[in-house]
Image: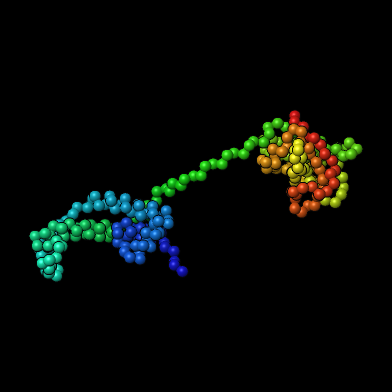
């Protein structure tokens, strides 16, 4: 398993890639990391900018003729048919090439000795996905309903808080029986949709999803059944309907 690089090792690798000091498999691995890792790519770009400023400050130093003579003596003789540039009388090209390599070596040595703090990479601009359209607002009017039993006695009262999408229910006399009270809304011409379980006594608050809240409209029907506690809210009522009431807009 390859050990992850430390920040200092990553910065050094970015500098070597920027200077062109890597070759073979090392360069391929570094180029792949640059293509896949935006943070590492930003570090390489930062090194490029830093080296560009240093190159402008470096004054080329031309070696003396004595140095070039010593270099020429150590080189193998050039064949007569060799199309390459001759050294005799043409040391200028070698001088410029050597001066360039010397500048690169001096720059890297300066960086490695001073060990500058890693430069924060420029921010990566990520295209943001378009924001989804906001859901349609819940009705702003107040919706109420009072559900009575067969004898006209009140079992519960309901009020919708449109601002918070909260259904407030006050249970007064829900009949005893197996199961838990579950409220349903039946839109005109539609199927029952569960609003969730409520307490058998006292007050309950039911937070509505936007699509469910829109079903609570003037003229819709509120119904109450007793359902198993498990699996609520249920897809459809299975118990007897204890009572219904028309939802009224105030």
Q: Quadrant of residue 245?
A: top right
Q: Quadrant of residue 107?
A: bottom left
* Residue 25 visible to an observer of this rendering: yes
Rendering coords of residue 92 (x, y %) = 13, 57
Question: Horizontally, is 40 left or right of 212 in the view?
Answer: left
Quarter of the image for the C terminus: give it. top right
Q: Residue at x 37, y 59 (%)?
A: 31
Q: Residue at x 70, y 31 (%)?
A: 141
Q: Residue at x 70, y 41 (%)?
A: 212
Question: Horizontally, is 113 left or right of 40 in the view?
Answer: left
Q: Residue at x 35, y 64 (%)?
A: 26
Residue toward you, 133 or 53: 133
Rendering coords of residue 30 (x, y %) = 37, 61
Question: Horizontally, is 63 left or right of 42 in the view?
Answer: left
* Residue 64 visible to an observer of this rendering: no
Rendering coords of residue 11 (x, y %) = 37, 58
């Amino acid at each position: 398993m390859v050990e992850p690089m430390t920040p200092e090792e990553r910065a050094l690798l970015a500098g070597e890639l920027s200077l062109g000091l890597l070759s073979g498999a090392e360069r391929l691995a570094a180029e792949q990391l640059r293509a896949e890792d935006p943070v590492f790519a930003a570090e390489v770009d930062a090194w490029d900018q830093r080296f560009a400023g240093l190159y402008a400050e470096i004054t080329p130093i031309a070696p003396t003729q004595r140095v070039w003579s010593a270099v020429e003596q150590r080189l193998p003789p050039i064949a007569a048919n060799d199309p390459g540039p001759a050294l005799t009388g043409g040391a200028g090209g070698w001088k410029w090439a050597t001066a360039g390599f010397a500048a690169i070596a001096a720059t890297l040595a300066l960086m490695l000795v001073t060990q500058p703090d890693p430069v924060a990479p420029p921010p990566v601009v990520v295209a943001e996905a378009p924001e989804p359209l906001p859901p349609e607002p819940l009705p702003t009017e107040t919706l109420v309903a009072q559900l009575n039993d067969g004898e006209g006695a009140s079992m519960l009262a309901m009020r919708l808080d449109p601002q918070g999408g909260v259904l407030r229910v006050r249970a007064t006399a829900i009949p005893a029986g197996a199961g838990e009270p579950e409220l349903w809304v039946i839109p005109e011409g539609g199927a029952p949709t569960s609003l969730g379980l409520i307490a058998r006594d006292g007050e309950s608050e039911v937070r509505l999803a936007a699509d469910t809240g829109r079903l609570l409209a003037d003229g819709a029907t509120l119904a109450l059944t007793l359902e198993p506690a498990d699996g609520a809210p249920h897809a459809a009522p299975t118990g007897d309907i204890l009572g219904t009431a028309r939802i009224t807009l105030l």
